[in-house]
Image (tube, grey):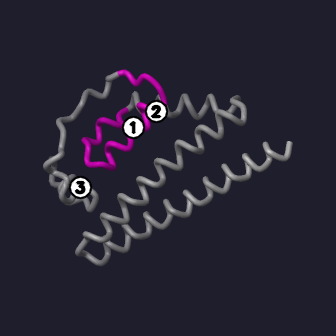
Amino acid sequence: MSAEQTDSPLATGRQSRAQPAPADDMPVLDHREAKARVLAVLGGGHPLIAGKSALDALTQRNRALMVGGDDAIKEALADQVVILEQVAAAYTFAAVGERKAEDRKALQTIALRAQSVLLQTLGALHQMNKAARNA
């Protein structure tokens, strides 16, 4: 790992799980695999695991949602809930273990933002379900 990666507040304590850099040209099978690769970076995986192919798959999925129906949008929102829960937890735990006050505050801010977006996402899902029941 580079000095940047080991000094990162999220990388602290994760060097034992570090993995070799995967090839960025590994094909992504679907949007779920792409999300898993992106989440793996939060879990201490090598940043290249969320390379161009994973991000391209997510972009393609987002474009498909533009013409998709309510079910596709609900599925995407439900996927985001899982991601946001993990992001909020990862940054909260990183903040708890951070010694430098400035870094701890930055990590807490990100965790709070992720929690705020999580609540908005849950609210959107609730509104869609409520509208479907009332239709």
Check residue 69 for magenta coloring: no
Instruction: Quote the CA–CA distance across marks 2 and 1.
Output: 6 Å
Nearer-the-camera pick, 75 or 113 = 75
Q: Mark 2 falls on what kind of element?
A: helix
Residue tagged by mark 1?
A: 36
Nearer-the-camera pick, 3 or 112 = 112
Q: Quadrant of residue 119?
A: bottom right
Residue tagged by mark 2?
A: 32
Question: Count of labels shown?
Answer: 3
Q: Mark 3 falls on what kind of element?
A: loop
Q: Main secondary structure of the magenta part?
A: helix
Compared to residue 110, the image places residue 135 above or below, namely above
The image shows residue 104 at horizontal and vertical percentages of: 32, 72
Kindly give the residue lying farthest to the right in the view shown: 135
The image shows residue 11 at horizontal and vertical percentages of: 23, 55
Could you tell me if the residues under marks 2 and 1 are in contact, i.e. CB atoms within 8 Å? yes
Check residue 43 for magenta coloring: yes
Task: Pick the quarter of the image with the C terminus.
Answer: top right
Q: Amino acid at mark 3?
A: Ala
Q: Is residue 129 left or right of residue 45?
A: right
Compared to residue 33, the image places residue 18 above or below, namely below
Q: Which residues are magenta?
A: 27-51
Q: Residue at x 43, y 64 (%)?
A: 111
Q: Amino acid at mark 1?
A: Ala
